[in-house]
Amino acid sequence: MQRKKENRALLIGAAANLFMAVIAWATFYYSNSEAVFLDGNYSFIMFLGILAAMRIVSIRTIKTKTFPLGRFFYEPLYGFVKGLMILGVLIMSVSTAVIRIVMYFTVSSDSIPMLIPGPILYYALACAAICYIVSIFYFQQNRKIGNTSILLKTEQKATFVDGTLSLGIGLGVFFLSSGGGGDSSSFIPYLADSFFVLILSSMLIKEPLTIIRESLIELAGGALQDNAKREAFEEIIITNMPEALKIENIFISKNGSKYIILIYISTDQAFYTKKDIIDAKAKITSILEADHPHLSVDIIPEGTSITKSSNIWRKTKGK
């Protein structure tokens, strides 16, 4: 079920991005806007990335001798590469805008083609609407599967960035049309979209950096960064853990759509059998698997753990 929802969402997103790339390149031809050209390249990169994401969905659960737990690491790896690509597009957008501005003020406006506002405005408004609709669609589909898909989360953020850049181009053209677009001696007909690209790029830079950071944490096997989901996992574990098994700590990690849960229990004056551990693990796993089909749960009777969780100590003391 999760695979079908992911694939359907990604397929719709791929079609939308290919369509936007084609109309962006056509708009660039008629408008002389470098910002539109870069926006089209961004959409095409998104299209290629989604094709890779669909391939990952189809192979991530396949187990081999080399990857006995599956290939879920492809998901955060994809997020990391996609984050770098988004960051690269933003850097390219800023660089192009800066070069255009510098050329205007230091060389000559004759070397820079004047923007033609009509095609840009229609393109920007259409693409912004498409991007925001697709971004909301990604968000809703991911929520239906418990926000477990890093692929849909990455695409949702990337599409939001694309839509905001497109909207910025539209605002730039609106400023151009209403603030002196008819005066060829003004800088506005030449640099309107460049200034808006700079402003929006500075606002959006956090999105790819967040994707890169979260992907690296998952690839490195770090702790789950979603606090709400971690607390929900902990609550279910504590509620369903037998009294005989005293929890010392819980470590939760995420690798793509696969969750890894390590439950550390005390060995100090503890009286339990191997069957107690097996039964507790089976019960907790069956409950969590209802919303998280790719799950690994282990109960470790060592009494010490990788890190301590104040939430766990607070909850267990209150029992």
Image (cartoon, rainbow, N blue to C red):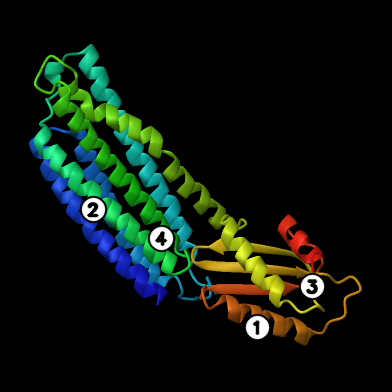
Question: Residue 143: which quarter of the image?
Answer: bottom left
Residue 148 placement, left or right of 189: right
Q: Are marks 2 and 4 in contact (CB under 8 Å)?
A: no
Q: What secondary structure is found at the residue carrying circle 3? A: loop
Q: Residue at x 31, y 64 (%)?
A: 10
The residue wearing badge 2 is 130
Q: Between tags 2 and 4, which lies in front? A: 2
Question: Would residue 194 appear left or right of 153 to someone viewing this image?
Answer: left
Kind of residue at badge 1: Ala
**Tag 3 residue:** 301
Q: Which residue is mark 1?
A: 282
Residue underneath mark 4: 151
x and y, in percent, of residue 218 in the image = 55, 57
The image quadrant that residue 265 belongs to is bottom right
| Quadrant placement of the C terminus | bottom right
The three-letter amino acid code for the residue at tag 4 is Leu
In this rendering, which labeled residue sits more in front, label 2 or label 3?
2
Residue 187 — which label? none
Which circle's residue, 3 or 1, is located before the other in the chain?
1
Report helix, strand or loop for mark 2. helix
Q: Amino acid at mark 2?
A: Ile
- Residue at image point 28% right, 60% down: 13
x%, y% of residue 4? 35, 74
